[in-house]
Image: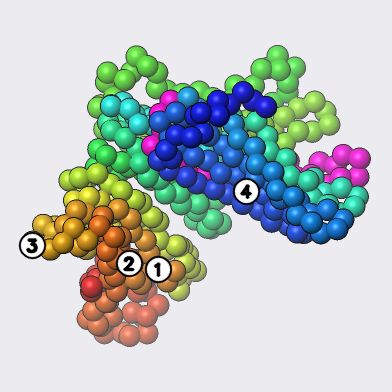
Amino acid sequence: EDGTNAENLQESIADISAVAHREDGNFWMLVATASSKGIFLHLSNETKGVDDEATTSVFSRQIGHHAAASVHFAPSQTPINNGDCDRGAAINHKECYLFAGSASPRHNKVWIYTIPYSTNVNNDAVPLWTIGEPLHHGHLMGHQDWITCFSWLDNEDENNNNHSNGEETKRESLLASSGHDAKIRLWKFSTYLSTTVIREEDDNGDVQELSGSDSDDDEAMIDDLEEEEGEARLVISRPAASSGSGSTVMTTTSVSLEALLLGHEEAVTSLAWRRQRHTKSGGKEKPCLLSASMDRTILLWMEEDGVWVPISRVGSAGGILGGSIGASLMGFVDAAFSPDADRIVGHGYGGSVHFWTQDVPSEAMDTEDPAEDEAEMEEEDAMVSARWVA
């Protein structure tokens, strides 16, 4: 329907990501794929009729026409009006981020999209899924080679990450991106939920959705951008809710470079955040990032005194001399935490699988007051002092 060239859909897929929902026997899945022909969205919708016979439909469309090496879905922090009612139907509006990494010789970009979707429950209690028009908000620059992996950390700690300031609140999340340039960039997404009312008649009905700091003229000086951590690279503004008086409440997401992580010598192949759990003091564990690389190492990163540093390294820096390609001689293509974050699994280039188990030394818990030690010993301290045993 949108004129997508069918031949482009036959191109080899470099990466794939999906988001799915199921409710009351109805199921839909939104899939994004990256290839040399661009970025494609595929919607699979399965519904059941009165005779319980399932009908599946798949629709594809192209949203980007530049070569892409990676795609990644993530939940959006932006609240959308959930209280709309239309002819007896309850409408639940949501949206998700779609990040895509380019595959250019240099000056690569992280493209940012938001995709709105909604559930319309009618009087017959049958959910009707609707996917809105994807919105392209701009791009983030800094990577000098293909961007091949992402990982999103959605921080949901109400005490530490939602701050009240008058009528405004702020929520922060982190996006990690990396690829063939061996550098990991952490992007902070700070979403401000403001109750300030902007009247459409005062703004002539023109709501600016994007204000990006990067332009094509800046690409020649892109190497200098990595030194400007904390500076907003992209500002995304869009309506959060509307009122009956013709006014709009806006929400703004500011994207800035949080940190540049240097430690790998070859292409980074995968990124994964450790699942954050509650500590004994009632807070959340510090973020911990896992990165795998073709340099035959897997690194664990944490922030210490405001600086992101590698706290542990596993793998074999020189590979297994004389070993087969199935060992770690060719590096790692993927790595992940176990659900309890006490084990790491690494996938070698040749198909081998490696496991490491966290071993916290007993002296890390030895103090003069064991009761006080147990109360103050946080999980991130155990991560820093732990050894990882193969």
Q: In this view, does 21 lie to the left or right of 50?
A: left
At horizontal 17% and vertical 46% (from top left) the residue drawn is 265
SS under mark 4: strand
Q: Quadrant of residue 238?
A: top right
Q: In this view, does 249 lie to the left or right of 49?
A: left
Quadrant occupied by the N terminus: top right
Q: In this view, does 136 lie to the left or right of 216?
A: right
Q: Look at mark 4 in the image and give the residue it sits on.
A: 29
Q: Is 385 placed above or below 209 here?
A: below
* Kind of residue sitting beneath label 1: Ser
Q: Is 279 placed above or below 308 here?
A: below
SS under mark 3: loop
Quadrant occupied by the C terminus: bottom left
Residue 202 visible in the snapshot: no
SS under mark 1: loop
Q: Look at mark 3 in the image and give the residue it sits on.
A: 322
Quick check: is 112 in the magenta stretch? no
Q: Is 96 placed above or below 226 here?
A: below
**Distance from Cα at disc 2 to Cα at disc 3:** 25 Å
Contact (Cβ within 8 Å) of mark 4 with mark 1: no
Disc 2 versus disc 3: nearer the observer: 3
Q: Is residue 345 left or right of residue 64?
A: left
**Distance from Cα at disc 4 to Cα at disc 1:** 26 Å
Q: Which mark identifies residue 338?
A: 1
Q: What stretch is highlighted in magenta?
A: 66-91
Q: Residues within 10 Å of mark 3 (few under 14, many from 20)?
A: few
Q: Is 205 placed above or below 267 here?
A: above
**Distance from Cα at disc 1 to Cα at disc 3:** 30 Å
Task: Identify the mark nearer the N-term, 4 or 2.
Answer: 4
Disc 4 versus disc 2: nearer the observer: 4
Relative to the observer, which residue lies in front, 119 or 167?
A: 119
